[in-house]
Image (spheres, rainbow, N blue to C red):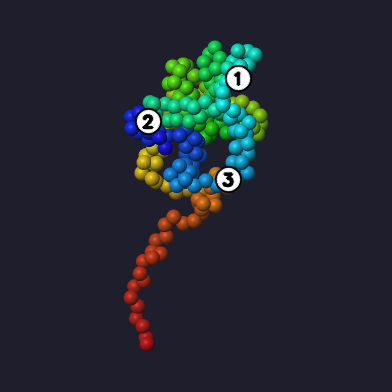
Amino acid sequence: MSNDPDGRRSIPISALEHYAYCPRQAALIHVERYFDASVETVRGDLAHAAVDRIGPDQRRDGTRVFRSLPVWSDELGLHGVCDVVQFDAAGPMPVEHKSGAYHRAGPADVQVAAQVLCLREMFGADVPVGVVYAGKDRRRHEVLVDTSLAGRVREMTWAIRALFDEHLVPDGVRDARCRRCSLRPGCMPDAPRRVEGLFAPRPEGSWDD
């Protein structure tokens, strides 16, 4: 992971989505470097391949569309790549593509909000919303990046930075999210994290020889 100009660890925007879903997932991917593919992750890779063509396009209405656009924030210490950024008279707007369903206030909202904050800083523009395109319903969902959501991104960025700097791997969440997670085989959320007395010596006994 690269460092920002202030010497802090720069956090990849993708880690925000992972952390919002499950802090342990974020640590396994970004600290332990563990990843395992599933049907869902492969479907997501294919969906991104359809839009991850580097360079600008010009639409008939004058909107310019940039694909795979690198973005960053020196203020927050964030970096990443936007799937799509649309530029029109109102300014830039990121569009994050997801292959599955959209869940309001979910991890995708945090990810696209971080992209919005980067674009605000980079272009000095008022970027009120980002968009999450959900492949499951083939709809665009606008995400208003207000003070509350921006604060959530900032707090999460600092929490992730502390996690990574200290090389910590939190316990799993052990709920419905585990069933959908491709990292379950290596995460083993149901395995006990601490077994008291497993290696403690037994008290001395009396033996009748």
Under mark 2, the amino acid is: Asp
Q: Residue at x 38, y 65 (%)?
A: 199
Where is residue 77, by image quadrant?
top left
The disc, 1 or 3, on the residue closer to the chain's N-terminal end is 3
Mark 2 neighbour density, 10 Å: few (under 14) some (14–19) many (20 or more): some
Which mark is drawn over residue 57? 1
Whether label 1 touches label 2, CB < 8 Å: no
Q: Please tell me which of labels 1 and 2 falls first in the chain.
A: 2
- On the image, the x and y values in percent for residue 103 come to 57, 33
Q: Measure the C-alpha gap from mark 1 to mark 3.
A: 32 Å
Q: Residue at x 33, y 32 (%)?
A: 7
For label 3, the SS is loop
Label number found at residue 4 = 2
Q: With 103 as the anchor, is 29 left or right in this view?
A: left
**Quarter of the image where the N terminus is located:** top left
Say left or right for 42 vs 162: right
Rendered position, 124 above or below 15: above
Q: Residue furthest right?
A: 137
Q: CA distance from mark 3 to mark 2?
A: 30 Å
The answer to whether one can see residue 113 in this image is no
Report the disc number at residue 37.
3
Using the image, determine if residue 73 lies above or below residue 192.
above
Task: Look at the image and tell me whether residue 182 can be seen.
Answer: yes
Image coordinates of residue 16 in percent, x first then y, are 47, 35
